[in-house]
Amino acid sequence: MSEKRNLYVELPRIKRKVNSWEGKVIEYLLNHPSNRPATEFSIEAITAFWLAEALEGQARNDELAKACWSAIEKLEGKLATIRRIAGIEKLPHDYSMVLASTTTVTTKSDNPTANHNEQLDPLESDIDDDDEIMDLELSEEMIQANKFFGMNP
């Protein structure tokens, strides 16, 4: 006689000082006006943030794509809420570096077309001569992401 067992995984209890940012978030979720359990908010956020990596290589392509779209929709919705609360219409241009593809990074020392004698921008004057400066080339996907977030590369 074979017995079916439900297997579970458990995230250990999380505890933070009440006056820390994380503590304020936990307190907010515990007292949320919807009366939904804080654990449900937590797992929803964790899932949206980590689902793609958790399923990568473990799910069929169609299932992975569906999960990724679901996560993207939730994260984009949260980004819109954060922008509204902060009064931010679009992300500052500085964030384009975060969206840059690291697969196309080359350094000026590796780039034969780079002008090694060019004068540094005043903002780059704190860079030592021994530091390598990267020329980032955005992929088409990153260009589209920048446009989506209202940034011009």
Image (spheres, grey):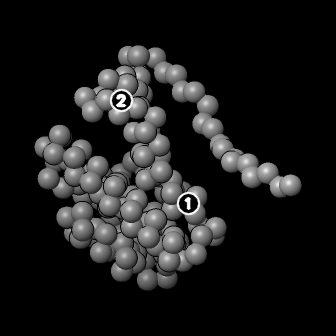
Res 34 quadrant in image? top left
Crowding at dot 2, Cα within 10 Å, few <14 / some 14-19 / many 20+, comes out as some
Tell me the kind of residue under disc 1: Glu
Label annotation for residue 53 = 1
Residue at the limit of the structure toward the right, as seen here:
1
Q: Residue at x 68, y 48 (%)?
A: 6
Q: Residue at x 32, y 23 (%)?
A: 31
Res 98 quadrant in image? bottom left
How far across and how far down the image is residue 28, in percent? Answer: 32, 26
Q: Residue at x 43, y 83 (%)?
A: 113
Tell which tag, 1 or 2, sits nearer the viewer. Answer: 2
In the rendered view, does 130 fall on the left or right side of 8? left
How far across and how far down the image is residue 83, in percent? Answer: 20, 47
* SS for callout 1: helix
- Please tell me which residue lies in front, 143 or 148: 148
Crowding at dot 1, Cα within 10 Å, few <14 / some 14-19 / many 20+, comes out as few
Label annotation for residue 9 = none
Q: Is residue 21 visible?
A: no
Report which residue position mark 2 lands on.
29
